Image: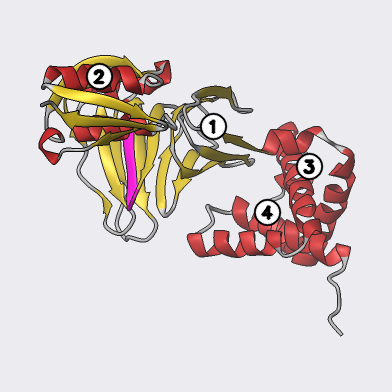
Amino acid sequence: MIERESAADIEAQAVRWVVRADQGELTLAERTELDAWLTGDPRRQGAHVRAEAAWLMLDRAKALGGAPAERSLSERGRMGRRRLLAGLGVAAAACAAIVIAPRLLSARYGTALGEIRRVPLSDGSMAAINTDTVLDVTMRPRLRQVKLDKGEAWFQVAKDPQRPFVVESGPVRVRAVGTAFSVRRREGGCDVLVTEGVVEAWSQDVGGAPRRVGAGERIFVSDEVGPANPAVAPIDITRNLAWREGQIVLDGEAFATAAAEFNRYNARKIVIADDSMADEKLVGWFRTNEPESFARAAASSFGGKVTVRGDVILVEAGE
């Protein structure tokens, strides 16, 4: 007979996870372990949220003075681990009726194909979220954590030196305090573009110090190799972030590259029938939701023709 985990045991384990996370950023292995624990029993997610809320209350109490969180580490040691966890467990249970706490601590944002959103975050930061993107945002007492599973987002980060703002995408990490930057998930790594301030970028799967990237610089951070050298490219950054206004700006990109970019935003896909056209260079300004107009303009510039068949915009060489 399998003994069901008690509610008290779940609350205690949830508190252990919160304390562990507050002591420093969880490693990839720890994050995987936490995710597995949370999905193992439907009661665990609620317990984890209550524990985070309780820890946040203790942190606020520290700022007011005289609260348990103000004790030194040695004093906490005298209290004993069991007593501390028990106290937090009581506080976590007391937070069960606070319905606003989960909204303040964590949220998920997503965009559909072709959708672009701007959302305010609870810390005063702002995120511009590109097409087909999923973000999980968690605000902790000493860490602002964003998980980017896929897609792209640009962040205007509110300054808070006590709570770094960290974007996680696979093993890639990008850390800032108060700055503005974008992260785009690609196969094998991430593109990072910095528009204000400085960020640090690294891969948890690779040793070595984080790479600093300043305003007007871009960098690719490989999952397996780590960060490349930053490149100064303020004009390219401005063009690459034109999606925030629903635009695609081309300045010498190959037709195949431009077509792939339009296909990110639209169910109707551009298909290039002849390889001879794929490397043709293009210059222009287009709306992200106008793939057919783009295809016809591109085809006319090098003597091609366009045929629309259902969800396919076929571009062929002219006769």
Coordinates of residue 64 in the picture (x, y in percent)? 75, 32
Coordinates of residue 59 in the picture (x, y in percent)? 70, 40
Cα distance, mark 1 to mark 3?
A: 42 Å
Question: How many marks can you see?
Answer: 4
Residue 67, labelled with which disc? 3
Coordinates of residue 272 in the picture (x, y in percent)? 23, 36
Cα distance, mark 2 to mark 3?
A: 67 Å
Comparing marks 2 and 3, which lies closer to the viewer?
2
Asked if the residues shown at circle 3 and circle 4 are in contact, with their CB atoms under 8 angstroms apart, the answer is: no
Coordinates of residue 271 in the picture (x, y in percent)? 28, 36
Tag 4 or tag 2, which sits nearer the N-term?
4
Question: Is the residue 89 above or below the residue 272 in the image?
Answer: below
Cα distance, mark 3 to mark 4?
A: 18 Å
Cα distance, mark 1 to mark 4?
A: 29 Å
Question: Is the residue 174 above or below the residue 207 in the image?
Answer: above
Tag 4 or tag 3, which sits nearer the N-term?
4
Comparing marks 1 and 2, which lies closer to the viewer?
2
Crowding around mark 2 (Cα neighbors within 10 Å: few <14, some 14 to 19, many 20+) is some
Instruction: Write down the region rendered in magenta.
Output: 187-193
Dot 4 corresponds to which residue? 18
Cα distance, mark 2 to mark 4?
A: 55 Å
Dot 2 corresponds to which residue? 296
Q: Is residue 249 visible?
A: no
State the image quarter where residue 174 is shown.
top left
State the image quarter where residue 36 is shown.
bottom right
Q: Is residue 166 visible?
A: yes
Residue beneath the point at 83% across and 49% down: 92
For residue 268, side relative to residue 296 (left or right): right
Tag 3 or tag 1, which sits nearer the N-term?
3
